[in-house]
Image (spheres, helix red, strand yellow):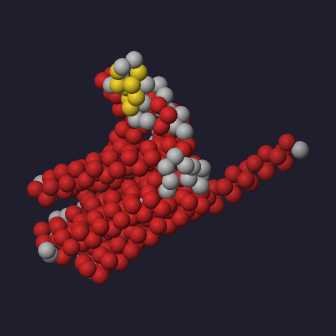
């Protein structure tokens, strides 16, 4: 067993034990998750991800550890966009709060399976056809631009008019209720799928749509071109994605009431996507001027700067401006 295989083994054991701990000790079936519980769970998953970063640094060195941290931050920030859409889905199908945890868990586990397949295919294609990185780069620049100028599109999303729901409705017998917490029921001797089943499928499908942006972005952060480094690159991509997605459930419960306060986070993410896309497109020239290890530091610093600035602006500066405007309106009214 080589070093990379050992890290995969450690990662797998940690994930399995952590899921058992999270579900067995920190979560209870059919029970509402409080903000306090969500905070503890978020600390748990983020702490675990950071601990794995330290382990990766010790075993593989500085470069893969910093690539992992950059990729994890990228995925984690994109998760907040996921949460906004998840809230719309739960609201559209009237999911009871006591079922949130179970539905999210199954949807997220399905999303992880889809992501593993997506990553495996994507990395294999990039390793065989390096020019695909330029296609991904152009796609990220376009996606970042669209995200920056079209931030209102998500609020117009209607889950019951989405292609996934229309497809399920066309090919499966659906029941217009949650079946008292069940995914399938029998009515008049016929098997039907409840709204909870529909929501699980939609959560996994929506995450896969988000992965179309996030996974190419991670490939732009991680060095996938150096042949001797490719096995480590795959490890970084897999682990950063899985840790970020597994923390999505606790993040949902923690931020669902405050997610709309991060008004300018999409713009911060959009700038990062454009930056990574341009870096991928200009990689040939960038590599001639800047060492790959230095590039990792620059990418990490840029991601932290953009995401941090957009969050600070959303929470503090923009709110103060709104408050001043409202006070001004009140003064004029008097």
On the image, which quarter does residue 76 sit in? bottom left
Q: So how many labels did they put on this image?
A: 0
Q: Is residue 142 left or right of residue 84?
A: left
**From where the camera sits, is residue 134 visible?**
no
On the image, which quarter does residue 209 sit in? top left
- The location of residue 51, given as percent across then percent down, is 39, 74
Q: Residue furthest left?
A: 128
Residue drawn 59% across the image and 61% down it: 36
Residue 266 lies, with reference to residue 302, above or below; the image says: above
- The location of residue 186, given as percent across then percent down, is 39, 25
On the image, which quarter does residue 293 sit in? bottom left
- The location of residue 60, given as percent across then percent down, is 24, 78
Q: Is residue 134 left or right of residue 310?
A: left
Q: Residue furthest right?
A: 334
Residue drawn 44% across the image and 32% down it: 195
| Front position in the image: 55 or 196 | 196
Residue 326 lies, with reference to residue 171, above or below; the image says: below
Residue drawn 38% across the image and 32% down it: 184
Q: Looking at the figure, which quarter contains the C terminus?
A: top right
């Amino acid at each position: 067993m080589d070093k990379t295989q050992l890290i995969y083994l450690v990662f797998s054991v940690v994930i399995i034990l952590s899921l058992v701990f999270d579900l067995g000790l920190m979560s209870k079936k059919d029970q509402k998750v409080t903000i306090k519980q969500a905070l503890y769970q978020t600390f748990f998953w983020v702490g675990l991800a950071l601990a794995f970063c330290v382990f990766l640094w010790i075993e593989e060195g500085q470069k893969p550890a910093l690539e992992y941290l950059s990729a994890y931050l990228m995925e984690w920030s994109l998760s907040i966009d996921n949460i906004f859409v998840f809230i719309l889905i739960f609201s559209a199908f009237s999911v009871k709060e006591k079922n949130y945890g179970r539905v999210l868990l199954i949807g997220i586990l399905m999303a992880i399976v889809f992501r593993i397949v997506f990553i495996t295919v994507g990395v294999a294609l990039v390793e065989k056809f390096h020019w695909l990185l330029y296609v991904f780069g152009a796609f990220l620049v376009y996606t970042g631009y669209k995200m920056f100028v079209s931030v209102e599109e998500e609020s117009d999303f209607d889950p019951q008019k989405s292609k996934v729901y229309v497809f399920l409705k066309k090919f499966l017998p659906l029941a217009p209720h949650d079946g008292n917490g069940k995914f399938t029921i029998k009515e008049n001797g016929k098997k039907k799928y409840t709204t909870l089943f529909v929501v699980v499928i939609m959560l996994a499908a929506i995450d896969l749509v988000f992965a179309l942006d996030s996974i190419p972005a991670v490939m732009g952060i991680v060095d996938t071109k150096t042949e001797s480094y490719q096995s480590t690159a795959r490890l970084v991509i897999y682990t950063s994605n899985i840790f970020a997605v597994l923390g999505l459930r606790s993040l949902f419960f923690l931020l669902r009431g405050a997610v709309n306060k991060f008004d300018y986070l999409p713009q911060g993410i959009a700038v990062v996507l454009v930056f990574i896309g341009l870096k991928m497109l200009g990689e040939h020239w960038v590599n001639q001027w800047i060492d790959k290890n230095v590039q990792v530091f620059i990418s990490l610093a840029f991601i932290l700067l953009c995401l941090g600035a957009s969050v600070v602006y959303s929470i503090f500066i923009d709110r103060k401006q709104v408050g001043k405007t409202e006070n001004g309106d009140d003064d004029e009214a008097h």
